[in-house]
Amino acid sequence: MIIKRLYIFLIFLVFLAGCQPGVDRPVKVMTFNIRYGLVDDGQNSWQYRKTFVADVIKYHQPGIVGLQEALGFQLAYLDSSLDHYTWFGAARDDGKQQGEYTAILYDSRRFKMLRNSTFWLSETPDKPSQSWDAALKRTVTWAEFEDSKTSKRFFYFNTHFDHRGDTARYESAKLLKRKITEIAKNNYIILTGDFNCDPLDEPYKHLTSKDIPDSEILFDTRLISKSGHYGPNSTFTGFDLNADPSEPIDFIFCGDKITIKKHATISDTFDGKLPSDHYPILVELTLNYN
C-alpha cells in the first residue's frame, strides 16, 4: 500500500514538473527558399528534388518553416508528403493563388494558428502591388501562434525581399520593421526570410538597428546563438557545391525575450544533389518567461 501511494505521488510530481512555467520547451524554426518550381534547372528541377526538400523537413523536424519561392503545386506536394504539417499564405500576384507564396508551414500538433495575414512590400501594402525599383511583387506572411506545450503566444513573420532593387530592399526593411512593431506590439517575434542582402548592406543594418525610436529591436540569431553557428557561412549556392563562400542572404531574426540555443546552416545532400539553390537555416530557441 505504501509503495502504491509512493508510486502515485511520483507520477504526480512528474506531471507537476511538466506544468511548471519555467520548464524549457525548445522550439525549432527554419527558413527555406525551396526554389521556384517552374524553371528548367535540368537535373535540379523540382520533379527531381522535391523529395529532398520534404526529407530535410522530415528529418530536422522544425516546428515552423518560413518558405520562399513556393508555388501552389509545390505547397500541395509538401502538404501531401508531410504528416501533421499544414500551411497558409497568399500568392503575391493576386493575393489568392497566382504567383509565389511566402508561405508558413507549421506542425499543427504543437502550434495553434490564432490569426494570419499577408501584406505587400510596397507603398500600398494592403493590396497586391510593387513599388520603388522592385522587379516583382513581394510579400510578408505573418501569424500569431500559441504553443500548446507552454501556452505562450508569439508572432512569426516570413518574407522574400526583391532580388534587383536596392531601393526596394531598403524601403522593404523600413516597412517591415514598422509593420512588425504595429502588429506584434512588444510580444515575442520571429522573422525568417530570404533578404537578398548581406550583413554589410543597409536593409540588414536597418532591421537590426537599435537606434530607431518606437521600433522593435531585431537580433540576428546567428550572432546570439549560445552554441555559436554550425555549418557553412553562405546560404546561396546556385546548386553548386563548390561555389565560392559568400556572406549569407537568408536569415532568422528574433526580438528580445528569446534565447537562441542553436543556429545551423543545413547543407544536407542526396547522392551529391542539393534540395534547393539555397541552404535552409535551422534555429532552436526558447521563449523566455517574464
Image (cartoon, rainbow, N blue to C red):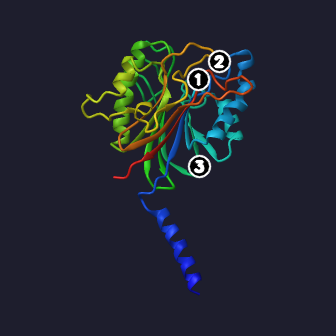
Q: Earlier in the sequence, mark 1 or mark 3?
A: 3
Point out residue 241 in the picture as x, y percentages from the top left corner.
64, 18
Q: What residue sits 56% from the left and 34% below the top?
A: 103
Structural crowding at the residue carrying mark 3, measured as other residues with C-alpha within 10 Å and reported as few (<14), some (14–19) or many (≥20): some
- Give the amino acid type for the residue marked by disc 1 in the picture: His
The answer to whether residue 91 is above or below residue 62 is above
Label 2's element? Answer: loop
The local crowd at label 2, few if under 14, some if 14 to 19, many if 20 or more residues have their Cα within 10 Å, is some
Q: Which residue is mark 2?
A: 239
- The residue lying at 71 percent from left, 19 percent from top is 44
- Tag 1–tag 2 contact (CB < 8 Å): no
- Marks 1 and 3 sit apart, C-alpha to C-alpha, by 26 Å
Q: Earlier in the sequence, mark 2 or mark 3?
A: 3
Q: Is residue 243 left or right of residue 142?
A: right
| Picture coordinates of residue 179, whole percent (x, y) | 37, 33
Residue under label 3:
108
Specify whether 187 is left or right of 235.
left
Q: Nearer the viewer, mark 1 or mark 3?
A: 1
From the viewer's perspective, is 166 left or right of 149? left
Name the spot of residue 20 as percent of width and height, x first: 44, 62
Q: Nearer the viewer, residue 43 or 80?
A: 43
Instruction: Mark 1 or mark 2: name the one nearer the start of the chain.
Output: 2
| Front one among 277 and 92 | 277
Task: Give the residue number, with chain letter if any, for mark 1.
Answer: 278
Place of residue 290 in the rendered image (x, y in percent of width and height, measured from the top left): 33, 52
Helix, strand or loop for disc 3: loop
Element at badge 1? loop
> Alpha-carbon neighbours of circle 1 within 10 Å: few (<14), some, or many (≥20)?
many
Distance (Cα) linking label 2 and label 3? 31 Å
Amino acid tagged 3: Ser
Q: Is residue 110 above or below residue 29?
A: below
